[in-house]
Amino acid sequence: MATNLLESAMSLFTPDVVSKISSLIGETPGKTQQALGAAVPSVAGVICNEASAPGGTAKLQNLFTGTSLPSEILSNPGSLLAGGTATQDLLRTGSGLVSSLLGQRAGAVANLLGSSAGIQSSSASTLLNIVAPMLFGVIGRHLTSTGLGASALSGLMAGHRDSILAAVPSGLGNVLGVGTNANICGAAPVARPAVIPEPVKKGVPVWAWLLPLLLLAAALFAWRSCSAPHVQMPKMASISLPCGTVLSVQEGMFTYNVATFELNGADSELPKRFVFDHLNFDSATTRLTPDSNQTVTDLVAIMKCYPSMTVQLEGHTDSTGDPESNKKLSQDRAEAVKAMMVSGGIDGNRINTAGWGQERPIASNDTEDGKAKNRRTELIVTKK
């Protein structure tokens, strides 16, 4: 029982299937196999962790009952990985599952898998989109064959806790925000020492000294409530795309603006320009920072729902450094974003790129704030 789910999932990845996946993600079969050995328990760990969280079981039930998996996913997974519509549908389903399970942490998990297996983060991201629906299929089959419903997920995953923790890569717990790997699936029970009650002592009634403390605490709370500045939390919006994908995004930000334009914008507004936010590169490189991957993942999800949508990616820099080097860097960065989108399942013919270096500033390069604004990547929607 303890290793049944992981072993069942790994048995799907035959040499033929691994070969097709390696071609799909652009990695060697050896590294692909190694990455799968980390990806399968990682996705299982994410599901187990969600099942142990308050309200997590209900969320998982909705995912299991609301996700339509291809009939061949367990009987002939290789047929779904040969390219074409079947592959695109599988990746779209997987992307939706990963986004629902991990949200903003998806990019960080992909980075962790990439570094642990020695593959590109973009390859690891695509791998997650393949593994998630396959593991969902295995778990669903187990629930069905044992006569259990989705409500039994919590107990099922808890029964696999030890085998999952033994196989997940180091650092997954930290990426998931639960600290150490030992806290995945919920922290292990900790024995508590017995509490020996203190003998009751006669004296001043408890209320006689407790009441002044309560009054003082209430007064302090009231003072802090009046004097503390009001911090407005970002307003989140849930956007339902035509293909069934639901995005949870911050209002007014890049992903929200692109999605709402595709939903409600007019062709007369084309070409429509958007400046990426939450899309940053390590200094002087084409390597995206871990918190930037989700922005690309969301854009891929949008473009999958609008198959006629075409775009141009434009890279820009500030005026620091050599102009020709800056122009090349901006072009390379635009190409790097395109490569991630293509690995996520978008046809490269739908994406053009351009690098302008420091030629098109939108702010003064005399200040650090202005330079930060000029270091940007823009998306131009050329066709809806």
Image (tube, rainbow, N blue to C red):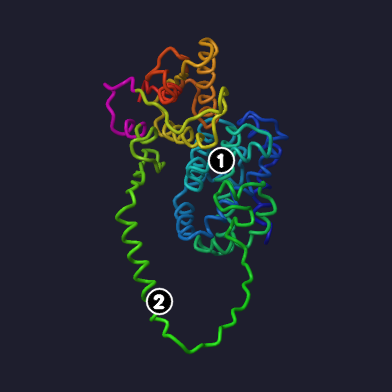
For disc 2, the marked residue is 210
Residue 311 seen anywhere in this rendered image of the structure: no
For disc 1, the marked residue is 108
Q: Amino acid at mark 2?
A: Leu
Residue at (56% x, 55% y) in the render = 49
Looking at the picture, tell me which residue is in the foreground, 166 or 156: 166
Residue range highlighted in magenta:
258-272
Q: Which of the 4 quarters of the picture holds residue 1?
A: bottom right
Which quarter of the rendering shows the C terminus?
top left
Residue at (59% x, 35% y) in the render = 81
Assess whether residue 268 is covered by the magenta stretch: yes
Identify the element where label 1 is drawn.
helix
Identify the element where label 2 is drawn.
helix
For label 1, count other residues whose C-alpha is less than 10 Å away and answer few (under 14), some (14-19) or many (20+).
Answer: many
Looking at the picture, does residue 369 appear above or below residue 153? above
For label 2, count other residues whose C-alpha is less than 10 Å away and answer few (under 14), some (14-19) or many (20+).
Answer: few
Looking at the picture, does residue 331 appear above or below residue 42? above
